[in-house]
Image (cartoon, rainbow, N blue to C red):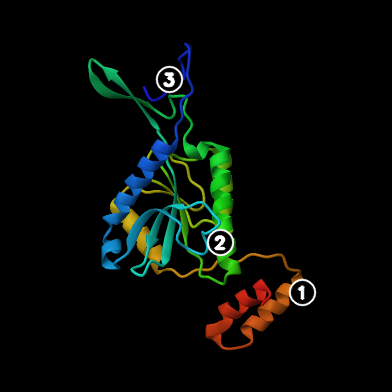
């Protein structure tokens, strides 16, 4: 078995639901799905695992899976937090399914607070560097194969609402959970449509701490000029330029 059943009371060794082997496999698995999407072929995009060749990412760990333009501009980032969620065992020489995450002792990645906090810290660092460098923000999606624990769901929803992540996609086991930004993705068509929307969407992450008077002045200055420059003026003022 991959995990001990919850009712097992014998001697136990430590088992991990996510390690470097599982991480490498799940990233490759998801990258392979992306490579076969119609939008990737139509727009001549590239899918790359462990991408880091970018000014924004230079001081950070590589992103798990990236979508790049034909000239290698970073278009979309996926942080893959997938784990073993099913248990299999040998029965009369055959491999059989013996239960899911509700029946075994392993914890999926998004049930571990350290995994969620690391993911949030990483995406905030990426967006903060984009903001300070006056770069367009690259959408970031967290991909999992199991619903997150309640506390993790709360943290991920908050990250989605403030623009740190642009969604959480569950491509595996689902228990009917829902929170803002969370999707249970059930088909290649769903993934293709979501990727197409994010590729076409142009967005910016911005943050800062300003007094109400400072914000009022920034807004008034931004709207006092050509309409096509409002966003640019607003972001420049937020950055203090």
> Does 112 appear above or below 182?
above
From the viewer's perspective, is the residue at label 3 or at label 2 nearer? Answer: 2
Q: Secondary structure at mark 1?
A: helix
Q: Quadrant of the C terminus?
A: bottom right
Q: Which residue is mark 2?
A: 127
Q: Which residue is mark 3?
A: 5
Report the residue at 77% width, 74% height from top. Answer: 213
Q: Earlier in the sequence, mark 1 or mark 2?
A: 2
In the displayed structure image, the side of residue 104 where residue 70 appears, left or right:
left
In the displayed structure image, the side of residue 196 where residue 161 appears, left or right:
right
**62 and 149: which one is in front?**
62
Residue 90 horizontal/vertical position (percent): 28, 19
Q: Secondary structure at mark 2?
A: helix
Q: Which mark is residue 213?
A: 1
Report the residue at 47% width, 54% height from top. Answer: 167
Q: Which mark is residue 48?
A: none
C-alpha distance separating marks 1 and 3: 59 Å
Report the residue at 22% width, 17% height from top. Answer: 93
In the displayed structure image, the side of residue 165 where residue 195 appears, left or right:
left
Residue 62 horizontal/vertical position (percent): 47, 53
Residue lying farthest to the left in this orientation? 93
Crowdedness of circle 2 by 10 Å Cα count: few (<14), some, many (20+)?
many
Crowdedness of circle 3 by 10 Å Cα count: few (<14), some, many (20+)?
some
> Does 97 appear above or below 127?
above
C-alpha distance separating marks 3 and 2: 41 Å
Q: State whether residue 233 appears in this view.
A: yes
Q: Earlier in the sequence, mark 3 or mark 2?
A: 3
Q: Secondary structure at mark 3?
A: loop
């Amino acid at each position: 078995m991959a995990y001990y059943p919850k009712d097992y009371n014998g001697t136990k060794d430590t088992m991990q639901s996510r390690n470097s082997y599982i991480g490498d496999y799940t990233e490759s698995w998801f990258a392979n799905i992306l490579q076969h999407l119609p939008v990737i072929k139509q727009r001549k995009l590239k899918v790359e695992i462990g991408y880091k060749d970018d000014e924004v990412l230079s001081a950070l760990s590589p992103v798990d899976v990236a979508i790049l333009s034909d000239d290698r501009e970073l278009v979309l980032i996926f942080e893959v937090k997938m784990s073993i969620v099913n248990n299999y065992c040998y029965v009369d020489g055959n491999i059989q399914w013996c239960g899911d995450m509700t029946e075994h002792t392993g914890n999926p990645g998004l049930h571990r607070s350290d995994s969620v906090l690391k993911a949030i810290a990483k995406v905030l660092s990426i967006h903060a560097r984009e903001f300070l460098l006056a770069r367009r923000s690259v959408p970031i999606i967290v991909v999992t194969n199991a619903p997150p624990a309640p506390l993790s769901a709360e943290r991920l929803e908050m990250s989605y609402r403030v623009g740190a992540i642009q969604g959480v996609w569950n491509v595996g086991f689902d228990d009917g959970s829902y929170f803002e930004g969370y999707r249970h993705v059930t088909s290649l068509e769903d993934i293709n449509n979501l990727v197409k929307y994010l590729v076409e969407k142009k967005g910016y992450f911005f943050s800062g701490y300003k007094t109400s008077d400072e914000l009022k002045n920034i807004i008034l200055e931004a709207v006092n000029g050509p309409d096509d420059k409002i966003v640019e003026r607003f972001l420049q003022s937020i950055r203090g330029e």
